[in-house]
Image (tube, rainbow, N blue to C red):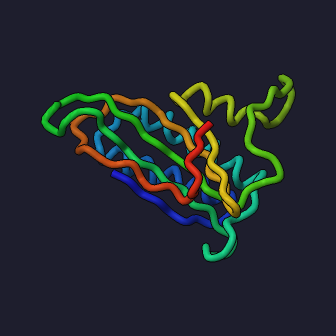
Amino acid sequence: MSRAVLLPHAPSSVTSARQYLCADLRASGVGRAEVDDVALVISELLSNALRHAAPLPPPYPPDSVRVSWSLVREAPEEEPEAEGWVEVSVCDGGAETLPRIARPSISALGGRGLGIVQRLAAKWGTEVDESTTTVWAVIDIPVLGAAPGERAPFVSSQSSRV
């Protein structure tokens, strides 16, 4: 199961992305707690893109970002319970600096997003090309009764993952 959606470069897109993602994962047999973790990761990545990065450049639609996810199983479909992972990504027009984990003070209103992503994800990183930046994360999960999937292709042409 894979999906990629173009969403407006607007705060309302966080809700839309979560709704699409959660529906896909539930339909694929992913448990509630794992769905919640993956939804939190995509929310943090997308919120960071909306706050810190520019929209995608042409030929993408004006004022848009690309959000994608892919559920991958490590075992054949016949196995009733298998380990797998979900890979999520957010592609935008880039920012002046690359995403990094901040160390906010206790009273700071923001700066915790990538720390949350690092805590929940098995790995995460950034891909950059001439005009876009893609931040991705891989979340390991048990998958019950889901069909095997393939990874979704990334928009970024560079595959140097950090």
Q: Residue at x 61, y 59 (%)?
A: 13
Q: How many marks?
A: 0
Closer to the camera, 49 or 124?
A: 124
Quarter of image, res 106: top right
Q: Residue at x 68, y 35 (%)?
A: 114
The picture places residue 160, in percent across and down from the top left corner, at 59, 43
Q: Residue furthest left?
A: 78
Q: Residue at x 60, y 25 (%)?
A: 119
The picture places residue 145, in percent across and down from the top left corner, at 21, 37
Up/down of 52 relative to 102, above or below: below
Residue 16 appears in the rendering: no
Quarter of image, res 125: top right
Q: Is residue 14 left or right of residue 63?
A: left
Q: Is residue 19 left or right of residue 15?
A: left
Up/down of 105 relative to 24, above or below: above
The picture places residue 26, in percent across and down from the top left corner, at 34, 44
Point out the image quarter for the C terminus: top right
Q: Residue at x 58, y 40 (%)?
A: 161
Residue 155 appears in the rendering: yes
The picture places residue 115, in percent across and down from the top left corner, at 68, 29
